[in-house]
Image: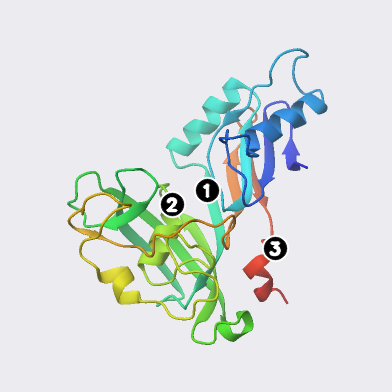
Amino acid sequence: MLKVLYEDDEILVVIKPAGVESQAAKRFAPDMVSEVKKHLVINKSCTPGKEPYVGVIHRLDKPVSGVMVYAKTKRAAAALSEQVQSHKMKKIYTAVVHGRPVNMVDNYVDYMVKTPDGNYSQVVDKGITGAKKAELSYEVLKTIDGKIAGMPETELSLVRISLKTGRHHQIRVQMAYHGTPLYGDMKYGVPVGTDKLDKKENADQGTMKAAGNRNMPGIRTAGNMGSGRESIALCASALTFFHPVTKKEMTFEIEPVGGAFQLFQV
């Protein structure tokens, strides 16, 4: 059932669960757009006999949960999309990472590219063709002993992250590249239950074979490239934007629950 945080004639703010696509999915898998359309039909929020309009404004990776806003009208979609492009829409994430970041508060500026097949992104040298600036800031909220989660040789940290840019898999790639991959992220990090992190291999390798393609010179890996999980310890916990019609600033926040997050709950 769709979890609605706010709704009016122009927008719908919801919580996307982990394991569900943000937009239309393949092979009849569940996706948020279909769920939003069902909600609009059931609640008679659209013209009878016509397919509801749902404007996709931003996206969250399938394994990520969190707050999302969808537009119910084209004018709302245009106004919200402009906020995304001008960086007026603010997104705050909460994550559980392996290890402890070097600094309690810091700002990461890297350069990233997608691999040729588009399934992965990686940190690269600034001069690499196609490299785009990726920036985020973070604050460490708490660090605990990994023994609590059955990983005695590592620590786990609860981190609040603010995105300055919106690159493909940006948080997952940058946090892994800097030695603290997200808990449960088998695409860029380490599997749950793995104690040791090979930080040198993760951060210092000069070249790599990208997703089965030829070597791409200058690319430094962000982590292991295994299969992804249905959920990782990353939640889009706060979203701030201006209402597309009233222009009022609106903020929606949720508390990450379950999974690795419960290890930090008092």
Q: Is residue 105 visible?
A: yes
Q: Which mark is residue 117?
A: none
The amino acid marked with disc number 3 is Val
* Quarter location, residue 14: top right
Which quarter of the figure is the C terminus placed in? Answer: bottom right
Q: Toward the viewer: 254 or 250?
A: 254
Q: CA distance from mark 1 to mark 2?
A: 7 Å
Query: Which percent across, then down, holds residue 9?
Result: 72, 26
Q: Which mark is residue 169?
A: 2
- Upstream in the sequence, badge 3 or badge 1? 1
The residue furthest top is 49
Q: CA distance from mark 3 to mark 1?
A: 18 Å
The amino acid marked with disc number 2 is His
Q: Are marks 2 and 3 in contact (CB under 8 Å)?
A: no
Q: Label 1 neighbourhood size at 10 Å, few (<14), some (14-19), many (20+)?
A: some
Q: Which mark is residue 257?
A: 3
Q: Is residue 145 visible?
A: no
Please name the residue that numbered disc 1 is placed on.
Answer: 61
> What residue is shown at x 60% (from left), y 26% (from top)?
76
Q: CA distance from mark 2 to mark 3?
A: 22 Å
168 sits to left or right of 56 = left
